[in-house]
Image (cartoon, rainbow, N blue to C red):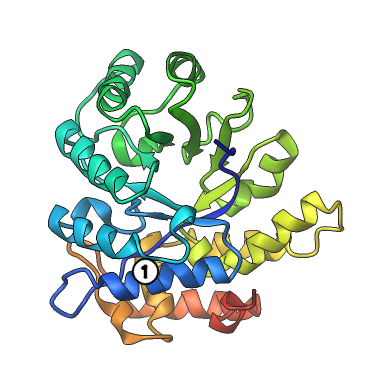
Amino acid sequence: MDQIKGIFAASMSIFNENLTLNSNKTIIHAENLINQGCHGVAIFGSTGQAQLIPISEKINLLNELSTSKYKDKYLIGSGLNSLGETINLMRISNSLGFNKFLIMPPAYYKYGDKEAINFYSKIIEKIPEAKIILYNFEKLCGYKFSIECVEELVKKFPKQIVGVKDSSYNLYENLKIENFSVLPGSELKLLKGLELGCSGIITATCNATASLARKVYDDFFAKKEQKYNEKLCNVRKVFDQFNLISALHSFFINENEIYENILPPLSLLNSSDRKKLFEDLKELNFNLKETKAA
């Protein structure tokens, strides 16, 4: 198994006016991100509103995704609290040829490292073929992986636990495991992470910054002067002023009105916040045209 590394977008989900998932447009959006420079994309992450999408619609998308020309570049999330439903969705994904997963531990309930290890152990018992990237995001699920927990999981399941997306940022500076992918969840951590030996990033705003982030990544390994990192970070800081899902959908409305559709209880930015988003991005000379500059 090659190490998972590079620029990954936590891809957006696209919805019809009646709020059902538009599989075709969601896949086109994901494929466009790869065309713009992403090494891959995560489907059904938190940015894709996975926790709010019915399982039946997820399965329909996975069936269509299995015919994508970029099939080997997808990480499949679950967005599910239920252990059984997570296993079932992963089993279906595996039957369609997907074996790389981004899995967050359950939200709402309080637990520690021992219980997190047990959760992933149960998954791997049922799907030993899975390659799992742990999703470390205490803000969303209420649990934060410790270095010791990750080390124990990798020791127990070296073939299955292959990486971590670190959106809590307590791991990426100090977690050192051979042939293990560490991917911070923000462009702000990309260059520093690479300098520390991280593998890349998985981020929401790579829906907009794919080409810029790829330039920073490539220039790092080519040992070129970093001409794009400052702008990349500044664009991320603009989006960070708002709920990222709301800001991204509001940003892409200028490309296609279908991005107006967002699942409750989420919403688009209000008019004043949307105005500020576009004014701040304009000051950086960043717009939709630049998102497509692969």
Which quarter of the image is occupied by the N terminus? Answer: top right
Can residue 269 be seen here? The reply is no
Provide residue 125's location: percent of width, then percent of height. 28, 22
- On screen, residue 292 versus residue 48, left or right, reads right
Image quadrant in which you'd find residue 86: top left
Give the residue displayed 33% in from the left and 75% down from the top: 25
Front residue of 277/25: it is 25
Give the residue displayed 42% in from the left and 78% down from the top: 252
Q: Is residue 186 above or below residue 280?
A: above
Can residue 159 be seen here? The reply is yes
- On screen, residue 18 versus residue 161, left or right, reads left
Provide residue 205's location: percent of width, then percent of height. 50, 61
Q: How many labels does the image show?
A: 1
Q: Mark 1 points at which residue?
A: 27
Give the residue displayed 24% in from the left and 40% down from the top: 91
Image quadrant in which you'd find residue 39: bottom right
Q: In this view, does 232 lie above or below 4?
A: below
Q: Is residue 21 above or below residue 55?
A: below
Give the residue displayed 47% in from the left and 36% down from the top: 168
Provide residue 32's location: percent of width, then percent of height. 49, 73
